[in-house]
Image: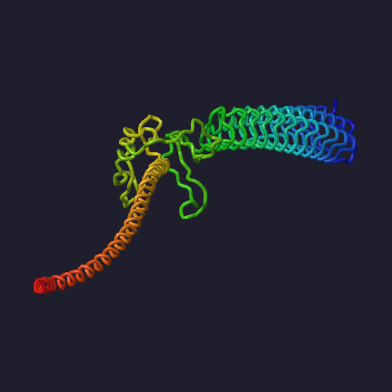
Amino acid sequence: MSALALCDIGNQCTAFGSGGLNSNTTGFSNTAIGFEALFSNTIGSRNTASGLQALRSNTTGADNTATGFGAMFSNTTGGFNTANGVQALGSNTTGGYNTASGYNALAFNTTGSNNTASGVQALLFNTTGENNTASGRLALSRNTTGFSNTASGVNALFSNTTGNRNVAFGPSALTKNTTGSGNIALGNSAGANPTIGVNNIHIGNAGVASDTRVIRMGRQGTQRKTFIAGIRGTTVSGVVVVVNSAGQLGVQTSSRRFKQDVAPMGDMRAVLMNLKPVSFRYKEADGHKPQQFGLIAENVAEVLPELVVRDEQDQPETVAYHVLPSLLLNEYQKQQAKLLDVAARTEHNRTQLVEVRARSSQELAQLREALAVRDKELTALRTETQALRQVTQQLMAALPHASSVGMTER
């Protein structure tokens, strides 16, 4: 079986090896190097095949480049593909615009298009998945129909089968993900543990199997400081962000739908009075170490342990200062209620005093009026008494004379 057996003269075809371009009729600008390279090509043009049975089944596919044993072996009509490596794109039939570099890279791809695989067995089992990019040994190796995934690093997105729109940078990044979509992982083994989670972001953190819609950056106990620009000096409305001992950020929800066992707080005055505010300076701080004010977590733990946040070793770490306002509000309301009660009783007493004073003033006025009447009566009586005394005196003065006259007449 000779090379270029059916090739028309003037088609600018080149073949080296038995069966190379054996069926070519009108295809032009083809180059076949190796046993049965481009063996079935008929009208496909601008193809380059180098290696035993490279592009063997190609018939009408054009603008393909295959280098390596069995590279693009099954391609028939797919075009604009590049395969470099043993059996790279070996099963591709009609898929186009694929690039495979490495042993078995995109080996089982059939109709998937716009894929790029660089590395041994990268995108190995991809069949119809499209728009995937895999760089590194076994990167996206088990992907079948998943699309728009990007994996860079050995074993990156290794187990992904149907997951879509995932981005993994780093060795073994997102390596256990199977069907999860919309995940982002950056770093060695970043996001390596989640399997079916969606919309996760893992940076330098392996995550946990159940993660979904979770952001993890760094590893607890590894990084000691975090600097994020664009926060300080920027005023926004919103709520306070808090962090727990596991390093999880969040806000305190207050809606009833998130709560249970709701009950009045009760009397917390004794507890609050036993808290001991202090001034201090942090051992590790910026240069000038300004004076601070607050509480000592160990002291608070003795009085109100619920107010203390502990670290992973169960040691007191900080105080939940954001809880204090609720405790203070509770006591303020109680004190305010007492003050209002005292004020109400004081007002009642004042009203009674006013009423007593009013009654006393009225009674005093009546008494004065009665005294005035009696004074008038007394004055009149005195006047009458004086007049009577005068009459009496007159009578008394007249009595001896009257007696004398009577005796004389006798």
The C terminus: image quadrant: bottom left
Up-down: is 213 above or below 333?
A: above
Place residue 159 in its image quadrant: top right
How far across and how far down the image is residue 353, in percent? 33, 53
The N terminus: image quadrant: top right
Question: Which residue occupies 38% across, 29% down?
Answer: 314
How far across and how far down the image is residue 268, in percent? 36, 37
Q: Along the line of sight, which residue is nearer the eye, 37 or 392?
A: 392
How far across and how far down the image is residue 153, in percent? 58, 34
Question: Which residue occupies 83% across, 34% down?
Answer: 77
Q: Along the line of sight, which residue is nearer the eye, 289 or 332?
A: 332
Instruction: Indicate how the structure is coloured in the image.
Output: rainbow
On screen, residue 167 versus residue 401, left or right, reads right
How far across and how far down the image is residue 82, in percent? 73, 37
Judge whether residue 381 can be spotted in this image: yes
Place residue 50 in its image quadrant: top right
Q: Along the line of sight, which residue is nearer the eye, 237 or 249?
A: 237
On screen, residue 343 versus residue 148, left or right, reads left
On screen, residue 29 versus residue 332, left or right, reads right
